[in-house]
Structures are given as structure tokens and as C-alpha cells.
Amino acid sequence: MSTFTAELVGTMILILFGGGVVAGVSLHKSKGFGGGWVVITFAWGLGVAMAAYAVGGISGAHLNPALTIALATIGNFPWEDVPTYIAAQLIGAFLGGVLVYFMYLPHWKGTKDPEAKLAVFSTMPAIKHPLSNLISEMIGTFILVLGILALGTNTITDGMNPFLVGMLIVVIGMALGGPTGYAINPARDLGPRIAHFFLPIPGKRDSGWSYAWIPVVGPIIGGTFGALFFQQIFEGNNSITFWVFAIIVVIIFISAQMTVKNIKSEE
């Protein structure tokens, strides 16, 4: 199996499990209907772990463009392979979304809420405020990438890293996922969102394209800063890029605070 195929299959597995649990909890007459946030966060985490175990020995199981770009930024992954990995991740995420659609085929018509249908495929904010939502995705992905790199230096966890990364996803979901649904992965959000757009889902709403840039840009900024932070603080490797990203992050935080009065709850 090539690295392209491994990233595609791994990301497809991830979305099948992750999108599948959201469908099981959200779609009417599913056996898991009403299972709640804890069920969703654990299934997403275990889905990441299973996907990583499946393809980690072939491609490294990035399964996430934000992680791929972050690793390339600090020199841990070749830039020339980045487009191939991201393409595979997006295709895999799209196919995962399609599989979830067919898995729950009779349930779409029986579910009246168009928001619930979109939530199976992609994230939307609990309270819409672009800069605040961007920060939520940045922080979540910062912690994700920082945690992955820290685990990589710990020989005590050899063989357990995919499971531990999965548990990290669970914690991020429980603690940091409330504001936006914690995409923390551009492919995880964009690929299934495209699937939602094209699939003939009865009674669906629009695919939320005005929000779609946030779960793409936020994770890339946060993940890259997480990698640079690890390199700067943990490894003592001083980099001008770290300070550039730090300034960008501070500007975003200040801008969010200055516009907080304009926040309105979603109807």
C-alpha cells in the first residue's frame, strides 16, 4: 500500500467512525439516538486510534492536513509530500462521509432537523462569532499537535501512541469542543462538508460555506504554532517563524476580545 492510499484509507476510517457516531446519536430512530456528547467524544477518539493503528506503519497516520503542515514547518516531514498527503486526506474524508450517508440511508428522511443532518458531516459553532470560533479551533489543534509531538519523544509509550492520541482527542472534545464541535482537522470538516453538499439528503439545509473557512484556517494556524512551540520550548530551537506565529496569534486574540460585544447566540 502506498502512503497516498494509507492516508486516504486511514482518514476514511476516521470519518466513518466519527461521522457514524454523530449520525447514530442525532438521527431519528437510530438505536443510539440521544446518546450525547460523551458518547461522541469517545467514539471520535477511538476512531482516531483505530485509523492510526491501521495505517500508521505505512504513512505515519497523519490523517490531518494541520498535522502534516505543522510537521513540515518544523522540518519533520518533507514539503514535497505535503500536497499528496492533503489530497489523500481530503478524498478519504469525503468518502468517509459518503459511507456514513449510506450507512444511515433510511434515517435521513425520518429526521426533520436539518441542523442535525449537517452535524453528521461537519461542524458549526454553538455561538457564531468568527474570531472566537477561530480561536477555539486554534487552541484545540495547538494542544493536539503539541501532545502528539510530546508523545513521540516518550519511549515509555511505545506501541501505545495511537491509543493515547485517541484519548487526547477525547479530552480535547470534552474540554475544548463545546464552542465549535472541535474539527481540529481541515479534512475532517471540509471533506464531509463537500459530501453533504453533493449527496441527495432529504430536507437538508445549505452546507454552511460561510463558516467553512474557520475549521480549515484555525487548525492550520493552531497546529503549526503547536509544532513551533514544541520546537522552541521543549527542544530549545529558536526560530523566527515561532515569533511570527506568536504575533499572529496575539493579534487574533486581541481582535476577538475587541469584537466580543457583537457576539449573538445562534437561533
Image: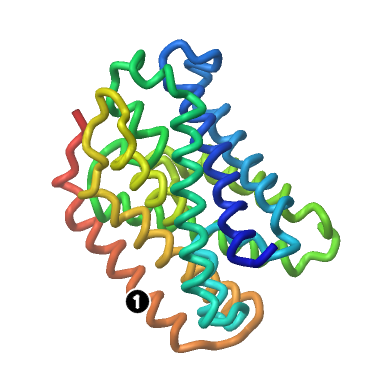
Percent x, y of residue 13: 60, 44
Residue at 19% in and 28% down: 267
Residue at 42% in and 82% down: 243
Percent x, y of residue 134: 32, 55
Percent x, y of residue 182: 44, 45
Identify which amino acid the numbered label 1 is placed on: Ile
- Position of 19 with respect to 133 (left or right) is right
Q: Is residue 147 visible?
A: no
Say which quarter of the image contains residue 127.
top left
Residue occupied by mark 1: 247
Secondary structure of the residue carrying numbered label 1: helix
Residue at 33% in and 36% down: 199
Measured along the vertical axis of the image, is residue 49 above or below residue 104? below
Say which quarter of the image contains residue 257.
bottom left
Percent x, y of residue 122: 38, 41
Residue at the limit of the structure toward the left, as seen here: 262
- Position of 10 with respect to 136 (left or right) is right
Residue at 51% in and 27% down: 103
Say which quarter of the image contains residue 67.
bottom right
Q: Nearer the viewer, residue 185 or 233?
A: 185
- Position of 7 with respect to 197 (left or right) is right
Number of disc labels: 1
Q: Nearer the viewer, residue 45 or 15?
A: 15
Q: Is residue 20 visible?
A: yes
Measured along the vertical axis of the image, is residue 136 above or below residue 29? below
Measured along the vertical axis of the image, is residue 7 above or below residue 181? below
Q: How is the image coloured?
A: rainbow
Q: Nearer the viewer, residue 153 or 10?
A: 10
